[in-house]
Amino acid sequence: MADYSPELDRAAQGQQQIVTRAQLLAAGFDDMYLYRQARRGRWQRVLPATYALFTGALTDEQRRISAALYAGGQAQLTGLAALTWYGFRYSPRSEDVHLVVPHHARRRSAGHAVISRALALDERARHTALYPVCSPARAVVDAARDLRELRPVRAIVAEAVQRGYADLPALDEEIRRARRSRTALVRKAFAEVVDGTRSAPEAELRECLAGSRVVPEIRWNPRLVSGDGAVLPTPDGYLADAAVALEVDSQEFHFSPADWARTLDRHNELSRHGVLILHFTPAQIRRDPERVRRMVEDAYESRRGLGATTRVRVEPRPADAPPTGEAPPTGEAPPTGEAPPTGEAPSPGEGW
């Protein structure tokens, strides 16, 4: 960076070696020099009027920075790119960087920068040094509107609530804001979460059992209490008449001995009170839903009426309890991965 002016050097350092044409022109370079540097393989033009002062692949953060510099100072990061920034575990990964700009902005999608216009930007957006990031609720709804399958939409909606990124009122507000524009999937996933489903695999189990003519109403994530008033572990699903509990066991929760011990303790506590626990993996539910349905039906028919003898009862949750069955942690989870760099992002120039 010795050949660069101090101003350009500071901008490049703060923007992870991503700079705009306007910044390069202000540093004394002309368009022909920019063209030659790119042709010689010393720099690369990553987006219109946006350059990387190196060759090779861009990191996720450099892709976000370059897209934000191209889109302009009012652009807000949203969709899958924002979910990745927040650290969502089950969000699909995409090479595209989705940004929302004011409706009057004259900027079109180019390369990995996907631009959408909105009548109103997100007032709850987080302001980082180089680009604003839409709130998790806005990012979830924007991402869901671009997805075409229910499973990933279920995953990001459930994770947003389960891990405390967004609460139900915030998600509901964003869904209402989007109206009926490509929101059918997110509306369905949201309704499932409101009704007590905590994860995408639970929603798939619920869908699997919905067509059963044998199994009665299933209580999802119920509050169970023993005969002496002790609160029991909460299963994913519960058939009160037969005292049958349903558990969806994702592999990630059994990686450590402590996780496995907690699962066994929950199982033993429910079994001690006469509850039969059926365990299913997400893979089993997806590969052979008919077999899963038959197992639940057989267990219910063989134990029908035993629920009264166990003295385990389902109690309504307090009015202020979250319908997802677990209280989300307070505050928003911090983003994982690369921290946003320092420095303010100037508006990019036009041209090559």
Image (cartoon, helix red, strand yellow):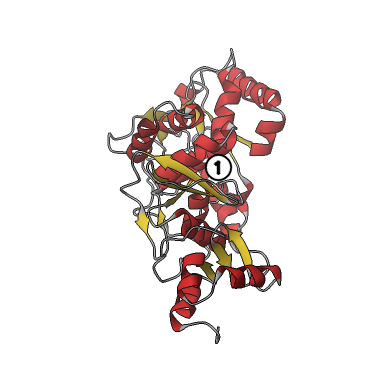
Residue 161 image offset from top left, x and y in percent:
42, 43
Residue 227 visible in the snapshot: no
Asked if residue 304 is positioned above or below residue 5 in the image, the reply reads above
Horizontal side of residue 137 vs 249, given as left or right = left
Of residues 272 and 180, which is closer to you in this image? 180
Q: Quadrant of the N terminus?
A: bottom right
Q: Nearer the viewer, residue 336 or 339?
A: 339
From the top left corner, tell me how far across and down residue 154 is, in percent: 53, 36
Rendered residue at 38%/38% (across/down): 171
Q: Amino acid at mark 1?
A: His
In the figure, residue 255 lies in which quadrant? Answer: bottom right
- Give how far across and how far down residue 111 sits, in percent: 60, 51
Q: Which residue is mark 1?
A: 267
Work out whether 244 lies above or below 163. above
Residue at 33% over, 33% down? 317
Q: Residue at x 53, y 63 (%)?
A: 337
Q: Position of residue 276 (x, y in %)?
A: 57, 32
Indicate whether 192 appears above or below 141: above
- Viewer-proximal residue among 4 and 149: 4
Q: Is residue 155 above or below residue 310?
A: below
